Amino acid sequence: MFPWFAIGHITPYIHLSNRLAARGHRVHFLLPGPTTLAKLAPLNRHPHLITFHPIAVPHVDGLPRGAETTADVPPHLTPLLFAALDATEDQFRSTVSRVGPLDVVLYDSAMWVPRIGRELGFLTMTYGVVSAAVGALRLVPSTDEEMARTPPGYPPHSAVVPRPDEIKQSRIFAENFGSVSLYDRIVTSVSGGDAMALRTCWELEGVFVKYMEEQYGKRALLTGPILPDRDHRLGLDEKWAAWLSKYPRGSVVYCAFGSESLLQKDQFQELLRGFELCGRPFLVVLKPSEGCATMEEGFPEGFAERVIDGEGGRGLVCGGWVPQLQILDHPSVGCFVSHCGFGSMWESLLSDCQIVLVPKQNDQIVGTMLMTKDLKVGVEVEKDEEGWVSKEKLSEAIEMVMDEGSEIGRVVRENHLKLREVLGDGNLQERYLDGFVCQLYDLLEKC
Ligand SMILES: O=c1ccn([C@@H]2O[C@H](COP(=O)(O)OP(=O)(O)O[C@H]3O[C@H](CO)[C@@H](O)[C@H](O)[C@H]3O)[C@@H](O)[C@H]2O)c(=O)[nH]1
């Protein structure tokens, strides 16, 4: 396993490794170290079968010292992290040579992995952990489509289509990420592999997966959602459990925007004012806003006195890492305000929470269209001309799904419940994994 240096990518690769190890397979896992390794090592449930190999992220001019993943750098420095990834080719080669022989390497952004695979004799395939919908809309190997139109042959009935903010964000694919554009990097990575694996399932994204198979001329091996089983999750710290348990069932609004999102101070403040305005207990987990050393420095005036110290401590705002899955599982949590990163999207789908979405990046906007327009399981907060949400719109969206009398709230709850029954069926994940492993054996036999 050799995922891109981002927590949202490394984590699902570890979950997949756990599932494979549970079937007796041996996994070697390359990830940045020492900090990221220390943070994620507890997720390894089969240390006798899964070996972590820390990669020293090479220094590249302009990259902060010690930066290992996208969580450690502001978004505009991400290209430098890609340059650092490319500079790990020798470390990758020596590690896979040392631990080999290998059957298959799963990777996502290191586009040179297939070349080394052909030299050393192992299969290679990208493991895509971002939605197939974004792959279909933006990353099929064609260069001449207009940004404002869906590409030729695109699934005709989907409401996941280009829209202004998504088009604006999609310009990122043309930007240089390391030595090549992000578009070329992803297309080269996918095209170079022997097949492509995707973290999704036919029930959710079947039309997009088929479209990608046609466009790339490659078989897609689906792993299903790949979340840790409930009984294998780490426990919830007493401090969270105690605070959450103060509130009635389904009443707390939880907000988190993944491991990368960095808000400007005014965006951060408006968001907090929205939670204050909606009047419900809330737990917000974000990074300190841009330019602020602490969370408190970014708070709106008088905010801490009013809702953190006052009102019985109705609000909790945290700048660190929280166990998101366990928080979503807590009976008091009833609403998840999310950025719709692909990991959080799955976690929201498999939770009992009502879903409110505030996407920023391209794939989050695509995921949001999938969730709100195709699947109709949540609502999106309307943004203003500046591209951000107002406190009133945020509060309205939360009420729209949380208020008992709301028709929209009823519809999304029903749709969500139906989908969760399909996706949450314990056998679904096992079936996908069995199929995935069989397809891997098939490919290996043919080589
Ligand atoms: O305090 C926290 C914050 C996050 N998480 C977990 O970290 C993961 C975050 O992943 P995701 O929701 O995908 O968000 P990002 O970290 O923002 O993910 C990046 O990678 C994703 C692909 O997985 C993309 O879809 C996103 O746009 C991109 O920002 C999830 O499993 C969360 O449960 C925690 O456990 N605790």
Image: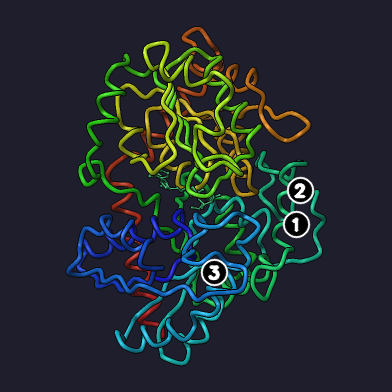
Residue found at x 58% / y 27%:
271
Instruction: Choose mark 3 or mark 1, whichever is in front.
Output: 3
Which percent across, then down, holds residue 419? 43, 34
| Residue marked by disc 1 | 152
* Closest to the observer, 297 or 369: 297
Q: Amino acid at mark 2?
A: Lys
Quadrant of the image containing the C terminus: bottom left
| Residue marked by disc 3 | 109
Q: How is the image coloured?
A: rainbow
* Closest to the observer, 327 or 313: 313
State the image quarter where residue 321 is shown.
top left
**What mark, if any, has residue 306 been given in the picture?**
none
Q: Is residue 424 above or below residue 274?
A: below
Residue found at x 70% / y 60%:
173
Marks 2 and 3, the one that precedes in the sequence: 3
Ligand 1 near label 1 (Cβ, under 8 Å)? no
Residue found at x 45% / y 22%:
414
Ligand 1 near label 3 (Cβ, under 8 Å)? no
Between marks 1 and 2, how big is the CA–CA gap? 20 Å
